[in-house]
Image (cartoon, rainbow, N blue to C red):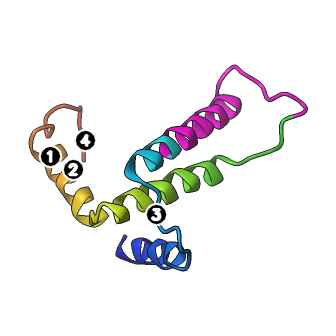
Amino acid sequence: MKDLQKEVDDYIGQFKEGYFSPLAMMARITEEVGELAREINHSYGEKPKKTSEEEKKTEEEIGDVLFVLICLANSLQIDLEQAHNLVLKKFNTRDKDRWTRKEN
């Protein structure tokens, strides 16, 4: 994650504008998640694409969401690896008995 965060920071750092405000990035994340939802709906749901719609891949849409999320984390100086570890700790403690485990 640190490498991804640095790569995005290096990319954004080459522009005078820098990172957008956190609120603007939250709007962008919402927009990108909407595009991902639309793609998932077309690929796995009941709503087929219109013939006039360009072909997009779920992978690309997930990448867009990830990029903007990394931008938001970087702008707020949040280490995504630490954030990930906090969430996993929560799942492994608070939610450890929430789901049915597979048999070994």
Is the stretch drawn in magenta largely helix, strand or loop? Answer: helix
Sequence-first disc among 3 and 1 = 3
Secondary structure of the residue carrying numbered label 2: helix
In the image, the segment drawn in magenta is 29-52
Determine the residue positioned at 46% across, 63% down.
19
Instruction: Measure the C-alpha gap from mark 2 to mark 4.
Output: 24 Å
Secondary structure of the residue carrying numbered label 4: loop
| Label 1 environment density (alpha carbons within 10 Å; few <14, some 14–19, many ≥20) | few
Residue position for label 1: 90
* Coordinates of residue 49 in the picture (x, y in percent): 79, 29
Tell me which amino acid carries mark 3.
Tyr
Badge nearest the viewer, 1 or 4 = 1
Residue position for label 4: 103
Residue 86 lies in quadrant = bottom left
Instruction: Measure the C-alpha gap from mark 2 to mark 3.
Output: 25 Å
Tell me which amino acid carries mark 4.
Glu
The answer to the question of whether label 1 and label 4 lie on touching residues, with beta carbons closer than 8 A, is: no
- The N terminus - image quarter: bottom left
Instruction: Measure the C-alpha gap from mark 3 to mark 1.
Output: 30 Å
Return the residue found at the far top.
46
Secondary structure of the residue carrying numbered label 1: helix
Determine the residue positioned at 24% across, 48% down.
104
Sequence-first disc among 2 and 3 = 3
Instruction: Measure the C-alpha gap from mark 2 to mark 1.
Output: 5 Å
* Coordinates of residue 39 in the picture (x, y in percent): 66, 37
Residue position for label 3: 19
Secondary structure of the residue carrying numbered label 3: loop
Tell me which amino acid carries mark 1.
Lys
Residue position for label 2: 87
| Label 4 environment density (alpha carbons within 10 Å; few <14, some 14–19, many ≥20) | few
